[in-house]
Image: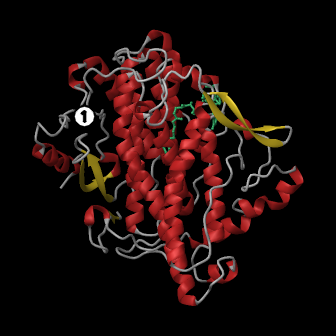
């Protein structure tokens, strides 16, 4: 059965009252009545071959003709939006899907608070809005580029399929931002849409916009940490943009968040399963000390201190994505009604305008860390970062529970906010994971214990051997508790061509 049959079956089975109609007859599936706007449709259909060219050149290497068990969005209803079936990735139906319009929605914050949400771009905020959409859009293809080589070392077909699922959905998120650019920003928007396909992760001359998206994702531990930490930045930023007074952006981001949740699941459970394999091997071999790295590595599993160093790296690089803690850009985006706080509409106990409010921000003053009350409007990036750190802790607690259950004496912690930062208040300062301000010499002497070192990377690389037999898993990772869409343990998630 072809991908298209799978989708039209699903679309046929949809009951009109439960789902917002999605047209799968158009070349570009959508629920925005694309067919009624010929100019927009033409512009997107012109961009599409360039997108496919980018996907074929920069997307997952080597598996483009394999049948992959993927989910595709067939509705935007939270209860039943996805349909599973085998698809070759270049035939994936990348669509434009917005969450349903909320009638009578008003702008929930900033100086336009209470006014009707904008259905068109407000002229005075055009440049700011375009910049934020471009930055958001730029991260999506970047992550696909970063993960391009991972298929070849997948620890199982289950994991390979999850990687490709994440990749095609990041591709769809690019479509989501391109739709906004092309529909609402005219010629500028079309140019930006093209530029999103031209920048390249890690390229010297034309890199991706934000730092973390130019880092390498060389191995599966990096992938799991990336999807745990960096996709969670995606969640926080999309949630802040979902509050936007520009209603099409809000609706787009609301639907993207449902997909982002799966990416974080892949990250959290990927690390969890790595921990489980380590703990099981240690218990079986009678290795009690998690810091006896040599003994643990001999078992073909990843020692827990190495996982902590990996987490330190990805946590710190991702924290930079929040921008400077004190930011006039963030203040303006909020006051303008373009980007809110996490959970803005449900936040109780303030006026959602924030002109008189303050927020505590940790700063480095004369080489010491001090907490100062800053104007809340200028401290919005600091606040979103704090919300992110809280959000990370839930997953980390679950990792710790499985270590405790195995009877091993080890606990993951999040490094201090200032650790290994390049952007914002802590850029240029040397802060230990415990939050002590250090000299350059102290940092140099210890950073190999806090961040992945050369020996770590060599060891990880020695583990990255493909395991492509249905139902089998590499030594360093435990099988999942449940299969995708409840498939049995030996399900062939990718039929390698
Ligand atoms: N690297 O006032 P500042 C996701 C720039 S992830 C390089 O400090 P602002 C995903 C900044 O652009 C979510 N440059 O911060 C996850 C600005 O430059 P311009 C992505 C940086 O503007 C996994 C200048 O420094 N979405 O979806 O308040 C897989 C001063 O900026 C960095 C968004 O980020 C950096 N780390 O906030 C796939 C939401 N940080 O403009 C996808 C949209 C800052 O003066 N973006 N700069 O040339 C935003 O809200 C904001 O642009 C930022 C920065 C939060 C990124």
Q: Nearer the viewer, residue 365 or 250?
A: 365
Q: Residue at x 49, y 37 (%)?
A: 237
Let me know if residue 355 appears in the view.
yes
Give the class, few, some or many, for how many residues have Cα within 10 Å of label 1's Cα (few <14, many ≥20): some
Q: Is residue 45 above or below residue 316?
A: above
Q: Nearer the viewer, residue 147 or 136?
A: 136
Let me know if residue 200 appears in the view.
no
Q: Is residue 335 above or below residue 176?
A: above
Q: Percent x, y for residue 344? A: 44, 32
* Image quadrant occupied by the N terminus: bottom left
Instruction: Determine whether, in the image, residue 356 is placed left or right of residue 260.
Output: right
**Colouring scheme applied when the structure was drawn:** secondary structure
What is the number of callouts on the image? Answer: 1
* Image quadrant occupied by the C terminus: bottom left
List the single residue furthest toward the front: 349
Dividing the picture into quarters, in which one does residue 461 lie?
bottom right
Q: Where does label 1 land, which residue? A: 27
Q: Percent x, y for residue 215? A: 62, 48
Dividing the picture into quarters, in which one does residue 52 lie?
top left
Instruction: Determine whether, in the image, residue 396 is placed left or right of residue 94.
Output: right
List the single residue furthest toward the top: 123
Instruction: Determine whether, in the image, residue 153 is placed left or right of residue 255.
Output: right
Q: Give the quarter the ligand 1 occupies.
A: top right
Q: Percent x, y for residue 185? A: 42, 17
Q: Residue at x 27, y 72 (%)?
A: 488
Badge 1 marks a residue whose secondary structure is loop
Q: Residue at x 39, y 27 (%)?
A: 249
Instruction: Determine whether, in the image, residue 211 is placed left or right of residue 384.
Output: right
């Amino acid at each position: 059965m072809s991908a298209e049959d799978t989708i039209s079956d699903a679309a046929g089975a949809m009951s009109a009252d439960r789902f917002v109609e999605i047209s799968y007859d158009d070349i570009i599936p959508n629920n925005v009545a694309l067919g009624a706007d010929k100019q927009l449709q033409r512009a997107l259909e012109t961009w599409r071959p360039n997108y496919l060219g980018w996907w074929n050149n920069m997307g997952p290497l080597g598996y483009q003709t394999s049948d992959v068990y993927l989910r595709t969005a067939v509705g935007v209803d939270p209860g039943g939006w996805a349909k599973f079936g085998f698809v070759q990735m270049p035939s994936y139906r990348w669509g434009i899907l917005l969450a349903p319009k909320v009638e009578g929605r008003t702008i929930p914050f900033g100086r336009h608070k209470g006014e009707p949400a904008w259905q068109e771009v407000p002229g005075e905020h055009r440049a700011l809005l375009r910049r934020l959409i471009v930055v958001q859009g730029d991260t999506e293809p970047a992550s696909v580029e970063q993960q391009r080589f991972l298929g070849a070392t997948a620890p199982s077909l289950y994991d390979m399929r999850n990687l490709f699922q994440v990749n095609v959905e990041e591709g769809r998120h690019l479509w989501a931002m391109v739709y906004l650019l092309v529909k609402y920003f005219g010629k500028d928007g079309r140019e930006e849409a093209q530029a999103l396909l031209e920048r390249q992760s890690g390229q010297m001359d034309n890199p991706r916009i934000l730092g973390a998206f130019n880092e390498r994702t060389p191995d599966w531990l990096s992938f799991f940490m990336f999807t745990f930490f960096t996709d969670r930045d995606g969640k926080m930023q999309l949630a802040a943009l979902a509050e936007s007074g520009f209603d099409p952006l809000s609706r787009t981001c609301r639907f993207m968040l449902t997909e982002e949740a799966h990416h974080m699941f892949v990250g959290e459970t990927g690390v969890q399963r790595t921990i489980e394999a380590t703990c099981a091997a240690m218990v079986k071999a009678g290795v009690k000390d998690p810091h006896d790295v040599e003994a643990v590595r001999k078992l073909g599993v990843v020692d827990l201190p190495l996982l902590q160093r990996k987490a330190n790296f990805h946590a710190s690089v991702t924290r930079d994505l929040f921008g400077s803690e004190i930011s006039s850009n963030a203040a303006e985006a909020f006051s303008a009604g373009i980007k809110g706080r996490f959970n803005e509409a449900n936040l109780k106990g303030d006026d959602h305008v924030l002109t008189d409010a303050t927020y505590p921000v940790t700063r480095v003053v004369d080489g010491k860390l001090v907490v100062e009350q800053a104007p809340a409007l200028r401290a919005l990036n600091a606040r979103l970062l704090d919300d992110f750190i809280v959000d990370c802790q839930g997953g980390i607690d679950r990792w710790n529970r499985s270590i405790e259950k195995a009877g091993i004496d080890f606990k993951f912690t999040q490094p201090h906010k200032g650790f290994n930062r390049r952007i914002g208040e802590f850029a240029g300062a040397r802060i230990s994971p415990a939050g002590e301000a250090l000299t350059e010499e102290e940092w140099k002497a210890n950073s190999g214990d806090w961040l992945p070192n050369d020996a770590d990377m060599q060891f990880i690389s020695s583990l990255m051997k493909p395991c492509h037999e249905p139902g089998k898993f590499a030594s360093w990772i435990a099988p999942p508790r449940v299969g995708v869409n409840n498939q049995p343990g030996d399900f062939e998630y990718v039929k390698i061509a």
